[in-house]
Image (cartoon, rainbow, N blue to C red):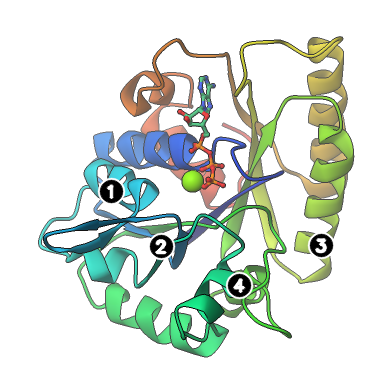
Amino acid sequence: MNCVFVTGTDTDAGKTLVSSALLERLGEGGLRTLAFKPVAAGAVKTAVGMRNSDALQLERAMSCRGVSYEQINPVCLEAPVAPHLAAVTEGKKLAVEGLHGDYLRLCEHDHDVILIEGAGGWLVPLNDEETLADFATKVNAHVVLVVNMKLGCLNHALLTAADIQRRGLKLVGWVANQAQLTTMALAEENQAWLTKYFAREHGAPLLASIPFQQTADALRVASYLPASQALISVLQGNTDF
Ligand SMILES: Nc1ncnc2c1ncn2[C@@H]1O[C@H](COP(=O)(O)OP(=O)(O)OP(=O)(O)O)[C@@H](O)[C@H]1O
Ligand SMILES: [Mg+2]
């Protein structure tokens, strides 16, 4: 396991929170972790350049130091809209090839694992032909799916997992995340059904069930994840932990 791609059933599913928690947990185990947010849409101008809050959170949670912001988040777009459209507005072109080059440069830092946070859902477009899923495929990532537990999540979760499988990628685990205060009806039954489905169809275990947090803190959320050695094992594609 060298490269883990965290995707979600939708935007705001909890990818950044879960990614930060995964980085904290892996770091506790002594792993040298790098974070990569290839494309971010929604950023503020600062004295040192454009900054996106997801990338800044991931930067804080990773254990490697001496990596520039631009290496962690090479494409930082100002408007909080679909990235390919934000890119056009800024006169930029997004493509798997360019992102792959950025990824390879980040990989030159000594590390044990790179955690990549997607943007939006699994099939977010990069341009007229490519999606971010094509980038995940290019780097042959192990995928973690964050499911925002709300009505409609089963369909989103199954479609996402089906496309991950179709691409020959491995869904190594999933996280049930209660990102909003109101709990969906029959939440436990939904989670139990998904747990059985993902185990049977994808060999992918439930990594954690994260309740709604009054304060979304990565360290606290990390405590819901398996201990670091077990987590490393499951991210490698082992189902028992
Ligand atoms: N379990 C939770 N309890 C409380 N708040 C949560 C929980 N999970 C996520 N949130 C909050 O919901 C919002 C969206 O979460 P997050 O930024 O992690 O989602 P995302 O999938 O990364 O979104 P994006 O598509 O914008 O990258 C954040 O404000 C986060 O703090
Ligand atoms: Mg995010």
Which badge, 3 or 2, is on the more N-terminal residue?
2
Instruction: Residue at 28% x, 48% y: name it.
Output: 56
Q: Secondary structure at mark 1?
A: helix
Question: Between marks 1 and 4, how big is the CA–CA gap?
Answer: 23 Å
The image position of residue 119, as x and y in percent, is: 56, 57
The image position of residue 79, as x and y in percent, is: 47, 60
Decide if ligand 2 comes within 8 Å of the CB at mark 1: no
Which mark's residue is nearer the viewer, 3 or 4?
A: 4
Instruction: Residue at 62% x, 37% y: name it.
Output: 13
Q: Is residue 36 above or below residue 213?
A: below
Which mark's residue is nearer the viewer, 3 or 2?
A: 2
Q: Quadrant of the C terminus?
A: top right
The image position of residue 73, as x and y in percent, is: 34, 65
- Residue highlighted by disc 1: 56
- Residue highlighted by disc 3: 163
Q: Which mark, residue 239?
A: none
Q: Is residue 47 above or below residue 19?
A: below
Decide if ligand 1 comes within 8 Å of the CB at mark 2: no
In the picture, residue 196 is in which quadrant? top right
Observer-nearest of 220 and 214: 214
- Residue highlighted by disc 4: 85
Neighbour tally class for label 4: few under 14, some 14-19, many 20 plus, Cα within 10 Å = many
Question: The disc labelled 2 sits on which kind of residue?
Answer: Glu
